[in-house]
Amino acid sequence: MKPKFFIITTVSDSLPFFKGQLNVLKKDFTVSLVSSPGVHLEEMGQEYDVSKFPIKMEREISLLKDLKSFFKLLVLFLKEKPKLVHANTPKASLLAIMAAWFSRVPARVYYVHGLRYQSILGKKKILLMLMERMTCWFATEVIAVSNGIKETLISDNITSKNIIIIGNGSINGIDTSYFNPDKVIEIKDDKLKPSDFVFGFVGRLVKDKGLEELILAFQKLSKTSKNIKLLIVGAFEENMTLSKEIIDTLYKNPNILYVGPQKDVRPFFKAMDVFVLPSYREGFGIVLIEAGAMKIPSITTDIAGCNEVIIDNKTGFLIKRKDVKDLFEKMKYVVENKQQIKMMKENARDRVHDRYSQDTVWKNAKETYLKIIKNHV
């Protein structure tokens, strides 16, 4: 009988991290999905023919609701008796790993995708760091999505346990046959002309992604450089963190094309000349490897999770965190050195294909989980 393998995330929007990989895991495990009720929980349960358990979990700290979620997870684990609990995202990880410990689940994996406390100050930061330490303590294994995350866990004294990295990092790798510019037709829009140099952004429209710095740098560049555009793809979050002035600029600047969230981002990537991600914190820059696979060099922050993906001056450019001036200068440089950008395109795709192809990531992941099961069951 295959050992039961439970994958838990706070919200169902995080479950697509495991698209495709579930078919590989199913060969050796009986896989189940747990998250707050949501579209992706239902869709992935049906698509991959795996059990799904909707348990409401709050992303923010809410003591009474968190206790309720904890007890529901505890009851679920006591009933289903999984051999391995694979916890992802901060809140689900704390609740699930603790519930797994109390219900004596032998293998308890905390997969660290990012460290939310890095962009928080004051007492909340202390509390979030404490939560991370607790999750790591209750886990049998801690897996980091990148070397940068591993180094931060160690330097911040979050855990003294041996931290695993699967392959070169990345939770799910990338399908380079899908993210292939030769198989995609770029978007057509009256705002984008063949002579335009297009900067692009894909992601959540929040302050932590460096969107304010990007728009400010682009506005400054627009005053001196002609035929440049900024293409923005993504959705606003409920807890609005961007200033009203930035949002107004996003909608009103004629050189900014905001297209909202898109199910297929590839045609929008293909319209870009350079991708820009001036993020404050990033567990692993999955969007950077998507851009690279589409032969798009990137300008991104020199932080953990980004500087492992991008090689400075070869597949893109690294900039200082929260530095509008540095971002502006790099954006100005790429507009003035278009030939160098063309040379970087092949480098970007080659690096992604060599390090992050899905077949390799999935194989390494399954081998890691089988070894964990062997060590604990």
Image (cartoon, rainbow, N blue to C red):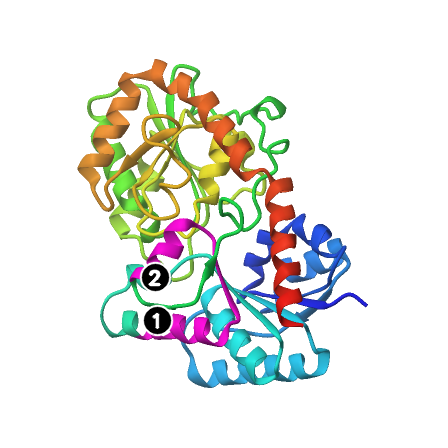
x and y, in percent, of residue 235 in the image: 46, 49
Between circles 1 and 2, the one closer to the viewer is: 2
Amino acid type at circle 2 is: Ile
Q: Main secondary structure of the magenta part?
A: helix
- Whether the magenta-drawn stretch holds residue 133 is answered as yes
Q: Secondary structure at mark 2?
A: helix
Farthest residue in the front direction?
Answer: 375
Q: Is residue 22 above or below residue 97?
A: above
Residue at 77% from the left image edge and 58% from the top image edge: 49
Q: Is residue 246 above or below residue 11?
A: above
318 displayed left or right of 16 = left
Residue at 73% from the left image edge and 62% from the top image edge: 29
Residue at 66% from the left image edge and 50% from the top image edge: 21
Mark earlier in primary sequence (1, 2)? 1
Within-10-Å neighbours for mark 1: few <14, some 14–19, many 20+: some
User: Is residue 48 at least partly visible in the picture?
Assistant: yes
Residue at 57% from the left image edge and 40% from the top image edge: 174
**In the drawing, what numbered circle is on residue 154?**
2
Q: Quadrant of residue 328?
A: top left
- Whether the magenta-drawn stretch holds residue 8 is answered as no
Q: Nearer the viewer, residue 97 or 189?
A: 97
82 displayed left or right of 298 = right
x and y, in percent, of residue 35 in the image: 59, 68
Farthest residue in the left direction?
Answer: 325
Amino acid type at circle 1 is: Leu
The N terminus lies in which quarter of the figure?
bottom right
* Residue range (magenta): 127-155
The C terminus lies in which quarter of the figure?
bottom right
Q: Is residue 39 above or below residue 196?
A: below
x and y, in percent, of residue 265 in the image: 54, 37
